[in-house]
Image (cartoon, grey):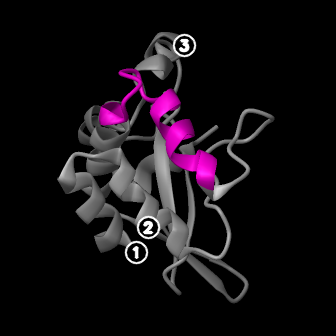
Amino acid sequence: MRELILEAVESGDIEDLRRAIERNETLPIFATGPARPRSFAGAIDFLKAQSFDAHGRETLAIITAIFDQAYARISRGPVVTYEWPAFAARTLGEASEDERREMWRCVRFAGLASSLDKTPPVERIGIGADGTWHYFAASS
């Protein structure tokens, strides 16, 4: 799944993410709350709307930055999920200086102003060991 997502990102066209999104049986989590997409058909439009440029370029750049990082292996009972970036769950105080610099690459432009004095809302991607794309959303 990671390779499928990266192929779409390398194309430069957010529409190419549709193939990876629709490979799942269920829609990956892109956000929580009432504004989140509830269908495969609305997923790309949602990702475009989340992107500062409204075309998805910011989203594609963030995905690239996320996958440039190390991942964490998360086990919940028999379920294993690989999460990029590995430092997504850390606070600024827990992160090394290198991790802090990399964190800012994984933050949406809209999240910058709200996070000057605290941990930024780092975007993260979770993919199951079975290849299911579980989420692409900011850490809380």
Is 95 covered by the magenta stretch? no
Report the residue at 23% width, 40% height from top: 98
Determine whether 99 is above or below 21 in the image.
Answer: above
Question: Residue under circle 1?
Answer: 1
How many residues crowd mark 1 within 10 Å: few (<14), some (14–19), many (20+)? some
Mark 2 is on which residue type? Ala
User: Disc 2 to disc 1, how far (Cα)?
Assistant: 7 Å
Prevailing SS of the magenta stretch: helix
Mark 1 is on which residue type? Met
Q: Residue furthest right?
A: 34
The front one of 131 and 121 is: 131
User: Disc 1 to disc 3, how far (Cα)?
Assistant: 32 Å
- x, y percent for residue 69: 28, 55
**Which element type, helix, strand or loop, lies under badge 3?**
helix
**Which element type, helix, strand or loop, lies under badge 1?**
loop
Magenta span: 41-58
